[in-house]
Amino acid sequence: MRIDVLTLFPEAFENIFASSIIQRAQQKHLLEIVLTNIRDFARDNYRSVDDKPYGGGPGMVMMCQPIFDGLEYVEAAAPTKGRRILLTPQGEPFNQSLACELAGEQRLILIAGHYEGFDERIRMGLQPLEVSIGDYVLSGGEIPAMVVVDAVTRLLPGALGDEESTEEESFSSGLLEYPQYTRPQNFRGLEVPEVLLSGHHERIQEWRTQQAKERTRLRRPDLLAEQSIDKQE
Ligand code: 4GX
C-alpha cells in the first residue's frame, strides 16, 4: 500500500511514522508513506495556502489551488488511483470497520487541513471520502491523519509480529478487551483472579469471554447493538 499525506506540517508526522509498527511495515515494503507539503504548491510570493472567508467571519479558509495542485501532483506520481480522504469532523465516523475497508486499498491519499476550514469547492471538486475520528474539534487534520495511518497499518497482512496478533484485540471481536494481569500475583493486597492461575485453558477462555461481554455491556452497549446489526446484514 502507498499512503500519501498532504499537509502543511510534514515534520509533525516524521517521529510518529518512525514508530515501531509503521516503521517495520515500511522496511518490509508492505507500506510506503509519502509526505507532501501543501505549501510547496502555493503560487504567490507569500506562499499563501489560506485566505479570508467570503461573506466575512473569523479565521482563514484553505484555498482550492494549492490543494488541487498538490493532489494532482501526488496522483500523477504513481499509477494507482487510490482513495482520496479528507479529515474533518463532518466526515463518516472512523472505526475498526472503516479501517479494515481502507486496509484493502492499494493506495490512500489523505488530506490534512489546518485553519478553520476548506473552501467548499475542495469537497465538490475532489469528491473525497470525508472521515472524522470523533466528535471533538482539533486544530488540524494532522492528528486524525496519523490515527488513520496507524489503525490501517496494523491491519496490513504481515505488519504485526506473531506476538501482536489482532485476533484477540478490542473491536476485532466487536467487544472490549478482557482484563489482563502480569506478575506479581499480589500487588498491595490486590490479587490476580484465581482462574488465571489455574492453567485450565477452557475455563480461562470462558472467563475472558464473559468478562469482555460484561465490560462491553456496562461501558459500551452501543457496540453490542452494532454487532447485532452486523449479524442481520
Ligand atoms: N476528525 N479537525 C479538520 C478543520 C479544517 C481545517 C482546514 C479543513 C481545512 C477532525 C476530527 C478535526 C479539526 C480536522 C478541524 N478543515 N478531523 N479541521 N475530529 O477535528 O477528523
Image: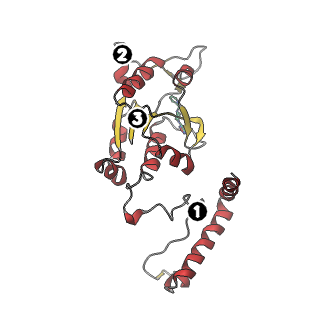
Q: Measured from the top left, where is residue 206 in percent x and y? A: 59, 77
Q: Judge the density around disc 3: few (<14), some (14-19), many (≥20) Cα neighbours within 10 Å.
A: many
Q: CA distance from mark 3 to mark 2?
A: 23 Å
At a point 49% along the width and 63% down the height, the residue shown is 167
Residue type highlighted by circle 2: Tyr
- Residue 34: image quadrant is top left
Residue type highlighted by circle 1: Leu
At a point 41% along the width and 54% down the height, the residue shown is 157
Location of mark 3 (residue): 5
163 on left or right of 166: left
Q: CA distance from mark 1 to mark 3?
A: 31 Å
Q: Measured from the top left, where is residue 81 in percent x and y? A: 43, 31
Compared with residue 122, is residue 107 higher up or lower down, i.e. above or below? Answer: below
Residue 231 visible in image: yes
Location of mark 2 (residue): 46
User: Which quarter of the rendering shows the N terminus?
Assistant: top left
Q: Ligand 1 within 8 A of label 1's CB?
A: no
Q: Measured from the top left, where is residue 173 in percent x and y? A: 57, 61
